[in-house]
Amino acid sequence: MRSLRMPRGAAAALALACGACRADAGGGRSWQLASFTARDVAVEVTLERDGAGKRWLASRFTPTRAGYHLYGKELPKAGIRGIGRPTLLEIVSASGLAPSGALQADRATGNLVEPLLGLTFPVYPAGPVTLRRPVTFARPGAATAELSVTYMACTEGTCLAPAIDKRFTVEIPEAATR
């Protein structure tokens, strides 16, 4: 049986960064809402407005160790037989902001087969993955949201401690809601 090694006492560093807005080549814009590194994964959360005016809450998850992958968003929250954790971006509560569609990933998952356990796990290829959820605003104006992320970085033989329901609050600038 393949064992999963989990580091003891893994510490998380949280540094929220707000404000910056940047334009992209497609006519859209994005506003950085938060960034932090915890459990050996760098997380950057933005609000994006595409060229058609649709708004997306996005989070880029980047393992800080080479060769590590993240589990697919479709993995059950408690993993399979307690193994693994899905990569998720969730809106816990919000003032003026509401989800308007399903969570989407910019990369397709593949199957990681564990023959000794008889289990198959959906995983993204090693490296970063960005999850996006379409959102709407009830009215123009600054908004506040409590968000949650869950993820777990692994190789085929080693898993790091997961971040489960890691909550943080973001301030969404008025310009992003118009």
Image (spheres, rainbow, N blue to C red):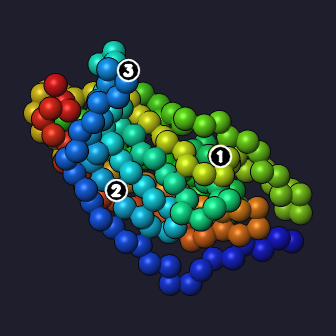
How far apart marks 2 and 3 lie (CA) works out to 24 Å
Tell me the distance, in whole angstroms, between the alpha carbons under discs 3 and 1: 26 Å
Q: Is residue 42 left or right of residue 81?
A: left
User: What secondary structure is found at the residue carrying circle 2?
Assistant: strand
Position of residue 126 measured from the top left corner of the image (x, y, whole percent): 66, 52
Give the residue displayed 19% in from the left and 47% down from the top. 19
Q: Going from the N terminus, do you reach mark 1 or mark 2 first?
A: 2
To which residue does mark 3 refer? 26
Q: Residues within 10 Å of mark 3 (few under 14, many from 20)?
A: few
Q: Which residue is mark 2?
A: 35
Relative image position of residue 174 (x, y in whole percent): 12, 35
Tag nearer the camera, 2 or 3:
3
Q: Nearer the viewer, residue 77 or 122?
A: 122
Vertical side of 169 occupied by 174: above or below: above
Q: Nearer the viewer, residue 108 or 144?
A: 108
Residue 71 visible in the shown view: no
